[in-house]
Amino acid sequence: SSVLQINKEDVTALQCKVVCLIQNGNFKEALSVINTHTKVLTNDVIAFEKAYCEYRLNRIENALKTIQSASQQTDKLKELYGQVLYRLERYDDCLTAYRDLIRNSQDEYEEERKTNLSAVVAAQSTWEKVMPEDLGLRESTYELCYNSACALIGQGKLNEAMKKLQKAEELCRQSLSEDSDVTEEDIEAELAIIHGQMAYIMQLQGRTEDALQLYNQIIKLKPTDVGLLAVIANNIITINKDQNVFDSKKKVKLTNAEGVEHKLSKKQLQAIEFNKALLAMYTNQADQCHKLSASLQSQSPEHLLPVLIQAAQLCREKQHARAVALLQDFADQHPANAAEIKLTMAQLKIAQGSVTKACMILRSIEELQHKPGMVSALVTMYSHEEDIDSAIEVFTQAIQWYQQFQASQTREANPKSPVHLSLIREAVNFKLKHGRKKEAISDLEELWKQNPKDVHTLAQLISAYSLVDPEKAKVLSKHLPSSDTMSLKVDVDALENSHGATYVRKKAGKLTGDNQQKEQGQGDVKKKKKKKKGKLPKNYDPKVTPDPERWLPMRERSYYRGRKKGKKKDQVGKGTQGSTTAGSSELDASRTASSPPTSPRPGSAAAVSATSNVIPPRHQKPAGAPATKKKQQQKKKKGAKGGW
């Protein structure tokens, strides 16, 4: 500073000041010094420092211009150029730059350059779906292992990627544990990004509970990487969907942290914005949802998701007509993406009950008209509406498309493709089912003429004629090959000794044997099932003759004389309605319990009398066992406190 007080334009002093400011992290102030003294600090003199400050201040486009305007491309500028290209997502140029650096440099930073090169390959695989080439890099560090795993995820090789991440975790622990100053918390913080990628693989594999648990563990560590936190929060929101929206609203705050936009790729940021719009829809924030989706559509006019989100929100508001109109406008403006939009429109029409209109929309998708799935869907829908003519027309158009396609492929006569034949056969079956037998027979005859050796078509034609003209069916059946010519190369012994054949043979043998024995009059040879011995009463005495009336209800037995004396329950008569069971003397409360019972009145039901002393065997007690008395539970009534 003392030198600059003497000479404010001293180049060396200004360069030293800029470097010191950069070392202290004062990038704005350093850039201000450079821009203030542009006459002295020209781009040739201080290009690297200026570009580096712009790079650290996230002015990536300016940094690129500064590097490209430098007259001499030093190694430092080339290193920075690779970083700038990576941030701009120009991966092809970045890959070329790093390859050139690795080829022409030999110093202690070679491992870092290889790591950056592998990161570029992983980004290409993930975001551009480019098949990564084998760079021959030795995965000696956990960073290289991690980048290799990311490339495998981009290819969909999830199991291999998980193994790479586990290896990266092991290498990371080994590398950091060698430093005595590194604590376990520091190691866990460094492993957070590896664990986050593991959780992402679990989520892709459908193990959402495990993924959610690992995501929350990482959030509890409070990592300083705002990009990592934003990605994890976004992934949790996608797991929650329309459930647990309160947790999703908390997690979405992590995606709004300062500096997130500089840490993530454009596709990652776009995915986060899409999920914010969906979350607004799930939380019934209609205005917010429309606002976010409209903003996304203006940023990416050709993207499908914004318009689909808007249509979904309109459907939630019961505005189906507006939703269909919105989708139709998008399909008209962007014909390349019209197919998926029209499928959504058809689904909305079906939900409204307009099946015929849905069919019209589906048939307007030219690139899908001939697909078997589309043909099947249209035929099913037309059949539901009982529009058989339109269903047959769908079959006809699809068959004609395959005929034209086959004719355009070659001038020679080729056999029909399996899909083409399958469509013709399905059309024939459909016509037969719905009474269009003549049309079905005409199609089959045409098909058979083209290939007379086709036994399957001939059999189907005979089957169709049998419904209309049996005599013609008999004539055609003569064209069927004989059984001798249709012999197949089958190992009969192996077939008979197979498990299924053995079972059937045994079963058939049993049935045949039974029939023969019955025909010979040998009687019933079925094995008699062993009858289980009945359980005898505990008090059973073999010396006592069982009561012959033991199977009758007690009241119907000849020795029944009524209920036991001394029962406290009210005696209920068994006679006709209005009859009395006992005389007035029996109802007299003054009579004692020991009084002998009176004789029953004529015409009454069973009267109460002394019971018989004869007990049937099934009710006898074991010898010497005391007679049990029926216990009566007496409930004590609690009186009110304080007397009466």
Image (cartoon, helix red, strand yellow):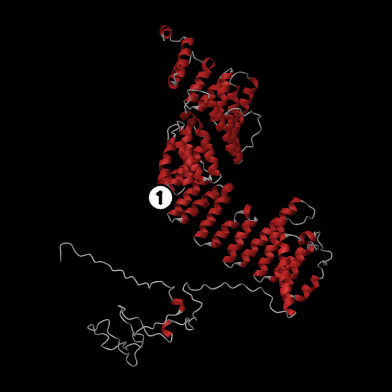
Give the quarter of the figure containing the C terminus: bottom left
Q: Which residue is drawn at 53% across and 53% down?
A: 344
Residue in front for this viewpoint, 163 or 522? 522
Residue at the outermost top position: 6
Q: Is residue 266 visible?
A: no
User: Residue 397 location, x and y as percent?
Assistant: 66, 59
Residue in front for this viewpoint, 336 or 165? 165
Q: In this view, does 442 lie to the left or right of 274?
A: right
To which residue does mark 1 refer?
Answer: 284
Q: Is residue 562 visible?
A: yes
Kindly identify the amino acid type of the residue bearing the numbered disc 1. Answer: Asn
Q: Is residue 267 left or right of residue 371?
A: left
User: Residue 399 location, x and y as percent?
Assistant: 69, 59
Q: Is disc 1 placed on a helix, strand or loop?
A: loop
Number of numbered discs on residues: 1
User: Residue 545 location, x and y as percent?
Assistant: 50, 81
Q: In this view, does 449 lie to the left or right of 598?
A: right
User: Residue 130 location, x and y as percent?
Assistant: 62, 37
Q: In this view, does 82 lie to the left or right of 539?
A: right
Q: Residues within 10 Å of mark 1 (few under 14, many from 20)?
A: some
Residue in front for this viewpoint, 186 or 279? 186
